[in-house]
Amino acid sequence: MARAMAALVWIAAASSLPNITTPGSDAGPPSDRVIPVRVEDGQARIHLPAGSAESGYLAVVSLAARQTRTGRVRLEVRAAADTQTPPEPLASEPLTVTLHGAEAEPVRLPEPAVSRPPNHRVFYLLARPGDPASPANYESRSAQLRALGQRVQVYVDQDDLDAVASPTLQDVVRTFDSVIWPALASRFGSAADVDHDERLTVLFSRAVGCVASATDPVDGYTRPADFDRRIAPPLGNQADMVCLHPRLTAGPHLRTVLAHEYAHAILVTRRVILGAGVEEEGWIDEALAHLVEDELGLSRSNVLHRVQAYLADPSAFSLVVDDYYGRGLFRSHGHRGAAYLFLRWCVAQGGPDALDALVMAPRSGVANLEATFGVSFDELFRGWATSQALAAECPRFERLDPGQHLSWSAVPTSCRYVWIPVDSTDGGVELIFDADPALKPQLTLIRRATAPSAPSLSP
């Protein structure tokens, strides 16, 4: 599977700054130029010459440090004298992404199941918030078999039998048997058959909602503990299963949630059960599951609101969060939106085998990214942050005029976008950048003929 992919050039040397066409531009010559700026000890001072009407620079501030503490960042714009000349921008070699993935063994698909599962089963689910390693936080739920396919069986909590209608049950079986399982099993292999019944178990239960607040409900989840036969009830069900909330009804959203949860089941199988026993970090694991939704061509209903939350305030959300649950960010849509957009960009640079390489790798977190794509995380992060400023799904930006400054306490692996107009300023402006060096600050300027548009998304 390993092979060199086409080179991605997102920044260029100072002697040859490229013209980059603005996404969505339909007329006129390309106007955007990407200029990485040298930052030393967290500081930079840059002269930005005046341009034509409405022109300016979009400053992309990206903070690559993967620490937990915040740090200070300050941008100031001053009117500049005519005699000033712009300093030479940071020269950089083109960023080349080369995929490094081990050859995957041919996937052997099991024959369809023929046995009939029991009509009733008891499952153990989290019933109250708190430590998921505490048996006291679980309760048993009796469930009834309501639908049966070749690759899937659907149980419904006894308390929710009236809430899950026949069209919903039929949609689960039809979508899983004819769309999700064939596409994913032939590519990654199927989820481990932990209970040896040759079918995935889908459980509908309102107890799924106990892992989140009533105002921010959960549609479903997949627990790695259920796939580990060494973990006895109530902490694990010793079954290959996913849990869905009964409020889900037949339609596109149900299908994309089902695919998302089954993607988690495959990731647990490939990495923990069949692999090196290394779980992927939460931020990448969730992003990979969202990318599987995209690969199957399903609804964006499970990710669009997360993308919108991130783009509305990109500086508020760290990209790298190794433990969503432990840091209380399990339901932070902005963090999930950042991870999805970042990994989507990385996979697009790596080519058609990139998603497979990330799923199959015996590594996790940033180490997985660097080994898979063959470049440092800092380079990937800067490339993604810059690409977002040129994307159709553009992050929110702020305006900074001469005589103004912007200061903030920045979270690590976050980005901020600031528009600096230079349209009618005699002699241009001077940009002063000052940031906590521990944040590993990066500054990239994008020369534009007009201000960027406000964020806009469509389903």
Image: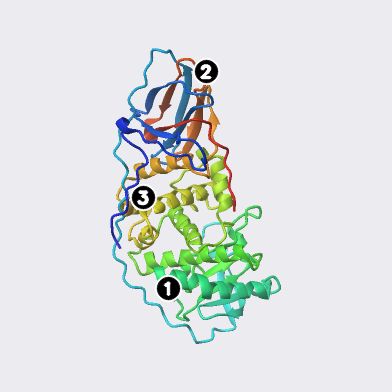
**Residue depicted at x 30% and y 30%:** 15
Image-quadrant location for residue 446: top left
Question: Which element is circle 1 on?
Answer: loop
Q: Upstream in the sequence, badge 2 or badge 3?
A: 3
Q: As rendered, which of 229 and 223 lies closer to the eye? A: 223
How far, Cα to Cα, is label 2 from label 3?
40 Å
Q: Secondary structure at mark 2?
A: loop
Residue 111 visible somewhere in the drawing:
yes
The residue beneath circle 3 is: 366
Residue lying at the far bottom in this picture: please name it: 115
Residue that sits furthest to the right in the current view:
162
Q: Which mark is residue 192?
A: 1
- Asked if one can make out residue 133 in the rendered structure from this viewpoint, the answer is no
2 or 1: tag closer to the N-terminus: 1
The amino acid sitting under disc 1 is Ala
Residue 107: x, y in percent?
36, 73
